[in-house]
Image (cartoon, rainbow, N blue to C red):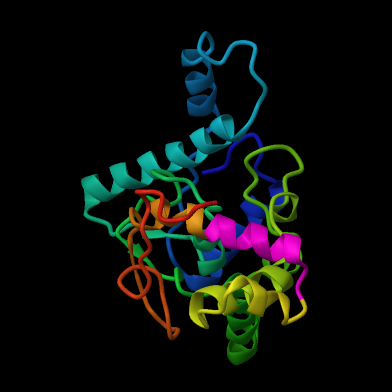
Amino acid sequence: MPSKFSSTGSISDSLDLAENLEIPCDVIPIKSIYISYLKTLKTEFANTKFNVAEENIQARIRGNILMALSNKFGYLVLTTGNKSESSVGYSTLYGDMAGGLAVISDVLKTKVYELSKYINEAKGKEIIPVSTITKPPSAELRDDQKDSDSLPEYNILDPILKAYVEDDLGKEAIINLGFKEAIVTRIISLVDRNEYKRQQAALGLRITSRAFGQGRRMPITNRWKDD
């Protein structure tokens, strides 16, 4: 479902992956639908800068298309978010979070890369296009966007998330592991503030000692934290 921001490489990688997995793949561009949304909101968005509102419209268009296909043909929609993204809210409600099963919701981003490499090695050929593993990760919802624009690199983010979410360590203990205080403070805040999103997420498959959902639920109201 390419938009005006989708790179040529991402489109070709998607088609190559589908071919390698021997699964059908339809291309449904969303550019014209996106433009229609912006025209509809032209008055309301007047004199404002492009931000996450315009970005998330694209994800929600895709979610609507997938759910339409699900209703029409009885498909089960699988959400794409991994544990790193759901931890810090790097996902869109009613967009990429729309679906019935979150297959990799308990898999940190760095582990996703490890699994991808393992699959290629185990098969002895390139099943998952190597470029999807080596290129800088991006949601591609605006020009030249990279995950690192908003988040620490995943080799820094994931150990902090594991310490906080799975190992139940506090801020000071995580800082003592060698991470910068400002980064740890920000990541913990993101995890806590995005609990409301996770409580609306699809059911996920658990592979770690502590997954989100029934394994880890936090309050989202009543000033449960002073800060």
Residue 102 in the image: x percent, y percent? 38, 65
Q: Residue at x 39, y 51 (%)?
A: 196
Is 102 in front, or is 69? 102
Q: Which residues are magenta?
A: 179-191
Q: Is residue 186 left or right of residue 165?
A: right
Q: Is residue 37 left or right of residue 220?
A: right
Q: Is residue 214 left or right of residue 35?
A: left
Residue 148 in the image: x percent, y percent? 74, 55
Residue 225 visible here = yes
Residue 227 in the image: x percent, y percent? 55, 51
Vertical placement of residue 39 versus 68, above or below: above
Q: Residue at x 43, y 44 (%)?
A: 95
| Membership of 220 in magenta stretch | no
| Membership of 184 in magenta stretch | yes
Q: Quadrant of residue 119?
A: bottom right
Q: Residue at x 62, y 49 (%)?
A: 139
